[in-house]
Amino acid sequence: MCARRFLIAIFMLTLLVVASAFAIFQWGGQMLVRQATPKGHFEAKAAGDGPDYGRLDSWIARPGIGEDPSRWLPDGLTATDAARPAATFFIHPTTYLERDRWNGPLDDRQSQDRAALFVRSQASAFNGLSDIWAPKYRQAAFGAFLLNSDDANRALDLAYSDVSRAFDAFLKVQPAGKPLILAAHSQGSLLLLRLLEDHKEALNGRVVAAYLAGWPVGIQSDLPATGMQPCIRPEQAGCVLSWQSFAEPANSSLVTGAWIGTLGLTGAKRTRDDMLCVNPVSGTLDGRSLPRDNPATLIPSTDLASATFASGQVGARCEKGILLIDGAIPAMGPYVLPGNNYHVYDYALFWGAVRRDAERRLAAWRG
């Protein structure tokens, strides 16, 4: 699967999201809900049977797969034969955009191709130091995130049931004492947060870091239930990073409006002051970094045939729970969301920084 498909798929994937977000600003949430809510009521059988995680074909990436998208590298970087001492479990974002059911079936070719392409562009940040395991799962449809309803909650529960079983299969084959990296984006981060709570005993002492990009996390309302701390400094292991990327002037109300006031994993109400932001460049809680500090931003070529990286382009600072970017921000693509929301590019903007951050935290974990 070529890099061209990866770039084009990102653009195509965001078309619906952009149109929906614009509708909120122009005509209000009711129109968006009508356009994106899946038809009918939740039926588990509509998503088909769940994956058998003992089979290679139930995984997008894992050791033993011939064409593993997680092994991709941008132009200018080459793979090495260096040992990969860690294992990464990665949960991809939403790629099922249809309204015909509440959960995407595993035999939907378009959504599965998109999922593989996101594994290529996001999980690849960890391929220098770890084997990567990325499961297929019956993801909740895009519209499930717009409603707090029984149908929506059951759709997310079904998605989580697959991810949880995949994680059990992943843990079962990892040697005792092997360091683990956990990473996700968007819907994947929502599910990973729940996974951290439910598997905290099995994870005790084994986690290098957990990267929950593109989804809000509560420092007090969520993290205590997981037994993990926020990443305060770059040489800290066993902690959680979360960031949501915006350029200025930023309007984060689409995110904060849906999150503030909801109940976190601890049962406490989430507040704006509680929103976790760890700068992936500095590796610090509520951190600030200059463009020169950012080792690599992934950017598409003019003909969309490949992705290259540029150093020293994008700086960032945490402010009121979101990550504000600045500097010579390259043209990432035409589908930045309203409010200057760079959600789709949470990993691409800081791909090299995430790679470096994982290396630092692995060294801290081993030390």
Image: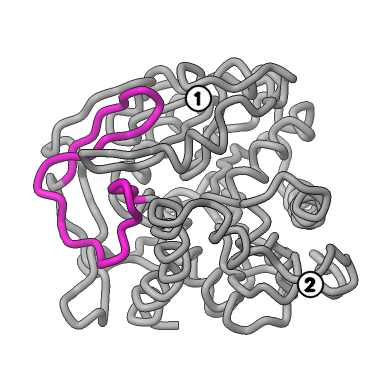
Q: Quadrant of the N terminus?
A: bottom left
Point out residue 27 in the picture as x, y percentages from the top left corner. 45, 56
Label 1 amino acid? Ala
Q: Is residue 164 visible?
A: no
Q: Is residue 352 above or below residue 284?
A: below
Residue at 59% in and 71% down: 97
> What residue sits right under mark 2 in the picture?
55
Q: CA distance from mark 1 to mark 2?
A: 32 Å
Label 2 amino acid? Arg
158 part of magenta stretch? no
Give the residues in magenta.
314-342
Q: Is residue 295 visible?
A: yes
Disc with the residue nearer the chain's start (1 vs 2): 2
Residue at 68% in and 68% down: 59
Local secondary structure at mark 1 = loop
Point out residue 175 in the picture as x, y percentages from the top left corner. 71, 44
Q: Nearer the viewer, residue 16 or 171?
A: 16
Q: Nearer the viewer, residue 136 or 78?
A: 136
> What residue sits right under mark 1 in the picture?
237
Res. 189 image quadrant: top right
Point out residue 229 in the picture as x, y percentages from the top left corner. 56, 19
Q: Is residue 156 left or right of residue 277?
A: right
Local secondary structure at mark 2 = loop
